[in-house]
Amino acid sequence: MTIWDTNFAISIIPILLEGFWLTIQITFFSFLISLVVGLLVAIIRFLKIPVVSLIFDFYVSFLRGTPLLVQAYVAYFVLPQIGLTFDALPTGIVVLGLNYSAYTAEVYRAGIEQLPKGQWEASRALSLPPMRTWVRIVVPQAVRPIIPVLGNYLIMMFKDSAILSSITIIELMGTALQIGSNFYRYLEPITIAGLLYLIISFPCSLLIRRLEQRFVPTH
Amino acid sequence: MSPHTDILKTLNPKVSDRDVEISFTGVSKTWGENHVLRGLDFDVRAGEKVSIIGPSGSGKTTILRILMTLETPDVGVVTVGGDVLWDAKPGVKNKETKQTIATRRKVGMVFQQFNLFPHMTVLENVIEAPIHVLGISKADAMERAVDLLELVGLQEHMKHTPPELSGGQQQRVAIARALAMRPQVMLFDEPTSALDPELIGEVLNVIRRLATTTNMTMLMVTHEMRFAQEISDRVVMFDKGVVVEQGPPEQLFKNPQQERTQRFLKAVNPY
């Protein structure tokens, strides 16, 4: 038995690419969730609404303080026992998105807090309603300097999506593991999977480094 | 006739039925142990131009910030144009009411640090609030913004963003932005203190123009004594949360009655 079987490696590429495509889709939708939920959580915590803000403080601590794998297991294997059953794919996308929302919330918070006080005061002096102030004045200025950090989280999320293979989702990692157990050959599928992750994450990290140089705060 | 006469006319509030524009009655404000305002009673007539002078930390900026609702008084009543802005009771947490928000619209403010929105163009800075607060159509807001920017001499910079402008230019945009809301009362909080010396004149020229050709009520905190003397109807000397002395500029600057005022004027202008 050879260590590396090139014919076998080539034969499994199409099916690995299918898993790869699912990984990209999962990352896209999970990232969308983490961007939207993270922003809302950051704003609610910033507003210091009694009780509600505390609940979201706990939300962030809980999601950051427990492993993504545990959260995925709870959502997929434990929730059905109390009558909440969802398909693996949507469960995985939501778990990954909410997990990262705890991190993006912290990043947004940094962006919001670094906004000079004068921007709030000018908005007030012009009687801009709170909603308009957030949408037009605060969020655009808060997001700009944190775009590189959010980009880094996107790459981390892309790689962390592999954890979802443990709740039966056949994304890139799940596909590689399945090929491995079917053919008793793990080297080729795992190697190719690793390379496919690298093909995306490496150029992305270079791009983010360039963004970091561009998005310096304008104040 | 000046080409800006039309836009300047639109800045005139209807003042006939209002005598007192701003009134502070028994207003106090404390920061921890520091009494910023101590039972302040202070009125400004409609159309009056008042300069507030005094040492740093004397509470003079707090007067403007309470009028702009950036600070809440601990106790006391503040009215603008006859409407209650604050009615603060002792011992409770005083919050702004609908009345506060409605009355605040009569007031505009120019800040020491300009506080323009750096991610928006000059034109967008000026039209944002008129469109989204006053409900003016975009076309009308733009037309008026162009006139106002012409008034402050910046029509050529409409498409630029604030970071591309000098400090003096930024402050003139800030003045145009405040004027776009048609305030009855304009507050100037040390409008030239953050500027390089050679840029102060262009900002003072704009303020002078407003002071001499409109009947807006203007309240200015400043360290520019000569300018205060030139444009003010009244100068108020403020220290440790109280009015030390006030009067027409000639009297206050040439013949101050209080020892504290004499000492302050000597210190800021020793020659």
Image (cartoon, rainbow, N blue to C red):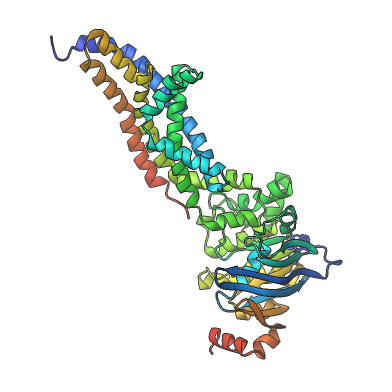
Establish if A37 lies above or below B185: above
Asked if residue B152 can be seen in this view, the reply is no
Image point (66%, 64%), residue name:
B91
Asked if residue A4 can be seen in this view, the reply is yes
Q: Position of residue A174 (x, y in %)?
A: 33, 17
Q: Position of residue A59 (x, y in %)?
A: 47, 37
Image point (61%, 60%), residue name:
B174
Left/right placement of residue B104 relative to residue B124 reads right
Left/right placement of residue B127 relative to residue B118 reads right
For the residue pair A1 and B138, the one nearer the viewer reads as: A1
Residue B171 location, quadrant: bottom right
Establish if B14 lies above or below B233: above
For the residue pair A174 and A125, the one nearer the viewer reads as: A174
Q: Residue furthest right?
A: B17
Q: Quadrant of the N terminus of chain B?
A: bottom right
Q: Position of residue A15 (x, y in %)?
A: 33, 12
Count the labels in the image. Answer: 0
For the residue pair B41 and B204, the one nearer the viewer reads as: B41
Q: Residue furthest left?
A: A1
Residue A78 location, quadrant: top left
Q: Position of residue B270 (x, y in %)?
A: 53, 88
Left/right placement of residue B123 relative to residue A11 reads right
Establish if B145 lies above or below A134: below
Image point (70%, 47%), residue name:
B131
Image point (57%, 48%), residue name:
A137
For the residue pair A47 and A21, the one nearer the viewer reads as: A47
Q: Quadrant of the C terminus of chain B?
A: bottom right
Left/right placement of residue B190 relative to residue A12 reads right
